[in-house]
Image: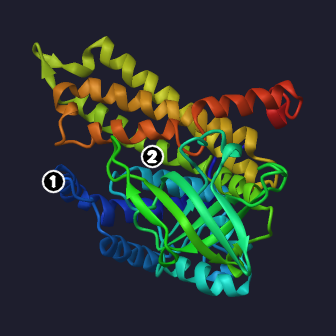
Amino acid sequence: MDFELTDEERAIRDTARQFITREVMPLEQEALLRERRHEPGLDHSELRELQQKAKKFGFWGLSTPEEYGGMNLPAVLQSLIWTEVGRTFVQFKFGGEADNILYYANDQQKAEFLIPTIEGDRISCFAITEPGAGSDAANIKLSARPDGDDWILNGEKTFITNGNDADFVIVVAVTDREKGVRGGGTTAFLVDRAMGWRSEFIQTMGEGGPASLIFEDVRVPARNILGEIGQGFELGMKWIGKGRYLIPSNALGIAERALGMAVDYANTRETFGRKIGENQAIQWMIADSEVEIEAARWLILRAAWTVDQGWDPRHSSSMAKLFGARMVNDVVDRVMQIHGGMGYTRELPIERWYRQVRLMRIYEGTDEMQRLIISRDLLRGYTKIGGHLA
């Protein structure tokens, strides 16, 4: 059993780390200053500039097929890179990406939506969550009724990432209520903002925020159906499933950076005539954090490895997301405790992480939903205790 990275994996990981360290981390103090003024850490033009710099480093479209100019990296490599991105709190991500379900588009839709999104000329968002349908995505109500060659959309989506910035949305709507959401009664539509939907900003405890999207008799031509009529819920689950090993990968980078700050602080901060790192209470917090980080690392890499084997990744990804999200919350909490009052200020990123990582236990599948998936797989015999080594 080999736990070593390949030469290629290590080289790409180290190059990503170099880029984050040289180009992104120097922006952190300015980002903190802006956020204290309630401004975005990076504006759209600055993000695009960073992404173009990254492109020169060779990072463009981590998961994008090569035919569209991307790298089409294996899942393990994508996980390693997302961990490096997590080391900085600047809201940066590599460019050249598009929602995975946009590849179900036809040629006309690819030219209008997919290609411009990959190139960074258009911004998309994905909308399935509703005020009464969060974890219970099968309870969506936003409707689409046929009207000649068009469809008329009415309803509301909420907590939509990029909802305030997007110029088009991939929205899942009920097209046949009798069939039910899981029975083929929903369809995905590509809807330009110019067609009439509007967004309303939702203030959260984190930086930035999602949006509610309001559809009031929004007319969408039938040519904007993504995939097939009745395929909406299936596409929605494919969109949600992709992030379940990438979110904890990002969390891993945050936890590693935060723990490094705690170790440095414990080795320099003195109270009562000695460094606080000599106190058992501090040592135990550092030790527990290191153990949990390492446990999360291997759950996450195993989930990514499962994807690369072509196996069903849902069970391993749910374990990775459940443990990784809890881990980063616990680590950041300890790091704040080690820093004391200074950790609670906005002079350091710790309180920012404290607010940011809390979302990881909620979005794209709550802790409770991950537990449901994991236990259901075992109770119904879909998987064995011990996984592929059982």
At x 54%, y 34%, the residue is 294
Q: Secondary structure beneath disc 2?
A: helix
The residue at the far right in this view is: 381
Amino acid bearing label 1: Arg
Quarter of the image where one finds residue 138: top right
Pointer 1: what residue?
Answer: 37
Seen from the viewer's position, the closer of residues 224 and 92 is: 224
From where the camera sits, is residue 11 visible? no
At x 67%, y 28%, the residue is 371
Q: Quadrant of the C terminus?
A: top right
Position of 209 relative to 65 (above/below): above
Q: Earlier in the sequence, mark 1 or mark 2?
A: 1
Amino acid bearing label 2: Gly
Place of residue 310 in the rendered image (x, y in percent of width and height, measured from the top left): 81, 55
Closer to the observer: label 1 or label 2? 1
Q: Quadrant of the N terminus?
A: top right
Pointer 2: what residue?
Answer: 253
Seen from the viewer's position, the closer of residues 149 and 29 is: 149
